[in-house]
Image (cartoon, grey):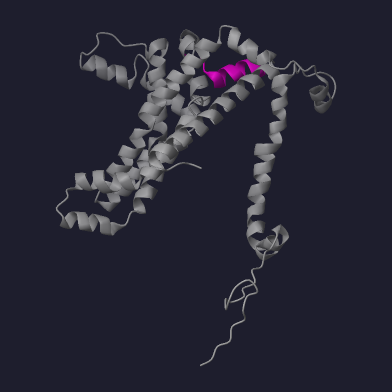
Amino acid sequence: MNMQTKAHPGGSGALAVKRKKGGLLDRLKEQKLLYVLMLPAIILTLMFSYVPMFGLYMAFINYQPGGGTFFKQFFTTDFVGLQWFHYFFTNGDFIRIMRNTLAQSFLSLLFGFPLPIMLALMINEMRNGWFKRTFQTVSYMPHFISWVIAANIIITMLSSGGVLNNILTGLHIVNEPIQFMQKGHLFWWIIAFSNAWKDMGFNAIMYLAAISAINPELYEVAKIDGASRLKQMLHITLPSIRPTIIILAILAVGGILNAGFDQQYLLQNNTVLEYSEVIDTYTYKYGLQNGMFSYGAAVGLFKSIVAFLLVISVNQLAKRTEEQALF
C-alpha cells in the first residue's frame, strides 16, 4: 500500500502540518459559552474587588465630608502623602494595637489550625454512619450562628453564675467565681478558644473533602501489610492531605492581622480595652465613629499591605521547602 506524503519545505519527507495560531478573538469565538458562564463572576469581582480600590487614595489625603458631592470632595481635598501612616506609627497606639492583634491572631492560629485537622481525622475514623453524620453536623453548626448570639453564649458561660464557674467552684478548684470577662490577660485566650469553637467544624469540611479523594486501595494494601489504623492515618491520610494543609496554612498566615471585628467588638468592654483593641476595631472607632476617614483608610491599607507581603513570603517558603504552594 503506497502512501504519499507531502514533503515539508524545511525538512526531508516530513509531514507538513499547519498549526492554526488563533488570537484572542478566535479563542473567544471558540469558547464563547465558557466565557458567558464566567461573565457574572468577572463582573462581581470587578465591582466589589477592583472598583473600590480607587478609595485607597483616601489614605493619602485629608478627607472630610462637606457640603459638596462625594467625588468633588474626594478629588479636591489636600494631598498629605504618608502623614496618616506616620501618625499611626508614632501616636502611641501602634505598639498596643499590634501587640493585641498579633497575640490574638497567633493564639487563634495555634488552636484553630490543627484542631480542624484532628477533627477531620477523627470523623474519618468513625465507622457508624449515622453517628458520623450526626457528629459532623453538630460540629459545624456553630459556624452558622451569628457572632451576636455566640458572644452572648460565651459571656453567659463565663459569667459569675455561668457554667464554667459553677464547675470550678463545684469541684473546689476555686473558692470564688472568676470574673473572666473583667481580666484583660484572659481576653486573648477567650478570643482564641471562641474562634476555634466556632469555626473548627466548618474548617474540617475541607480536610474531609481532601481525605475522600484518597485512593481506597492504599488503605487495603496497608491492611494486608498489617498496618494499624493509627499507622494508616500517619503514613497515608496525613501525607495525602499535606498539599491542602500547606495551602490553608499559607492563607491563614496571610490573614494573621485579621484578628476579627465582630467577636472583638461584642466581647470587649472598658475594663479589658487595653488587651482587646485590635486593628479592625481601632479602624472602626477612629475611621467611622470619630470621623477620621483618611486615618482609618491608612490603617486598613497598612494591614492589607502586611497581609500581602506575608502571603508572598510564606508561599515562596513553602515552594522551596515542600514544592507545594498556592501559586
Q: Splitting the image into 4 quarters, where does residue 234 fall?
A: top left
Above-or-below relation of 101 to 216 = above
Picture quadrant where residue 168 is located: top left
Q: Is residue 23 left or right of residue 279?
A: right
Task: Residue at 41%, 16% (x, y): give it.
Answer: 187
The residue furthest bottom is 1
Nearer the observer, 306 or 269: 306
Q: Is residue 324 left or right of residue 265?
A: left
Residue 266 percent location from the top left of the image:
50, 21
Residue drawn at x 39%, y 23% as measured from the top left: 107
Q: Residue furthest left?
A: 226
Q: Is residue 150 above or below residue 293?
A: below
Q: Position of residue 251 (x, y in %)?
A: 48, 35
The tally of labels here is 0
Foreground pick, 177 / 219? 219
The stretch in magenta equals: 276-290
Q: Is residue 312 magenta?
A: no
Image side of residue 101 versus residue 212, left or right? right
Q: Position of residue 150 (x, y in %)?
A: 44, 28
What main secondary structure does the magenta stretch of the protein show? Answer: helix
Tell me if residue 141 can be seen. Answer: no
Residue 322 seen in render: yes
Q: Say if 110 sits above or below 269 in the image.
A: below
Give the x, y percent position of residue 290. 66, 13
Q: Residue at x 79, y 24 (%)?
A: 74
Q: Quadrant of residue 114?
A: top left
**Residue sitting at x 14%, y 53%:** 226
